[in-house]
């Protein structure tokens, strides 16, 4: 299966997403903000970055920008509860597989991850 980094500042949501993806057989790393995510990406190559857009310290778009410098072509899924962030995220180009609006079901996030990795 795939190696995935989940960057999400809301601990409860992050834990649920990590658990669901782990049950699907993925190796999942987790970060509570973009800066921690970037530190993980310095040590680990991942197949997919699943990141909240709005986070403290470093937001998901900055994280994705830095991640793409380290791993060009990295597949990225964004999660957001803020519709105004969607257009900003689309500016990163074709590596953005999907932008999932919160709240979402675990089934929908699992399907989005499967489609992004296909």
Image: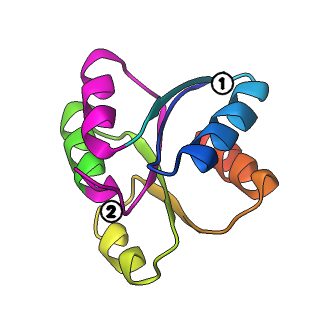
Q: Residue at x 18, y 39 (%)?
A: 69
> Where's residue 8, x and y in %?
47, 48
Is the residue 57 above or below the residue 3 in the image?
Answer: below
Which mark identifies residue 47? none
Query: Looking at this rendering, what residue extends furthest in the bottom direction?
Result: 84
Residue 73 place in picture, x, y as percent: 34, 41
Q: Within the magenta stretch, is there residue 37?
A: yes
Left or right: residue 36 compared with residue 75? left
Please name the residue shown 67% across and 49% down the image. Answer: 115
Q: On the rendered structure, is 52 left or right of 12?
A: left
Residue 37 vs residue 108, the one in the foreground = 37
Give whichever of 30, 115 is nearer the camera. Answer: 30
On screen, 2 above or below 94?
above
Q: Position of residue 37 (x, y in %)?
A: 33, 35
Q: Which callout, 2 or 1, points to the residue nearer the camera?
A: 1
Q: How is the image coloured?
A: rainbow
Q: In which quarter of the image is residue 1?
A: top right
Q: Quick one: label 2, few (<14), some, or many (20+) residues within 10 Å?
A: few
Queried whether the magenta region covers residue 52, the answer comes back as yes
State which quarter of the image contains the C terminus: top right
Give the extent of the magenta segment. Answer: 33-61
Toward which corner of the image does residue 100 lie, by quadrant? bottom right
Residue 14 x %, y %: 57, 43
Residue of label 2? 93
Q: Is mark 2 on a helix, strand or loop?
A: loop
**Would you say the residues marked 2 and 1 are in contact, meaning their CB atoms lie under 8 Å apart?**
no
Residue 118 can be seen, yes or no: no
The residue under label 1 is 26
Q: Which residue is drawn at 30% across and 44% down?
A: 34
Left or right of 45 in this view: 108: right
Between marks 2 and 1, how big is the CA–CA gap? 25 Å
**In the foreground, 6 or 117:** 6
């Amino acid at each position: 299966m795939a190696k995935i980094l989940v960057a999400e500042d809301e601990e409860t949501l992050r834990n649920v997403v990590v658990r669901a993806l782990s049950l699907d057989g993925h190796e999942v790393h987790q970060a509570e903000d973009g800066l921690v995510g970037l530190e993980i990406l310095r040590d680990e190559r991942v197949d997919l970055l699943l990141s909240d857009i709005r986070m403290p310290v470093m937001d998901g778009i900055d994280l994705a920008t830095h991640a793409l410098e380290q791993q060009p072509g990295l597949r990225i899924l964004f999660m957001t509860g803020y519709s105004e962030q969607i257009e900003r995220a689309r500016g990163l180009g074709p590596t953005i597989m999907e932008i999932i609006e919160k709240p979402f079901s675990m089934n929908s996030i699992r399907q989005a991850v499967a489609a992004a990795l296909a």
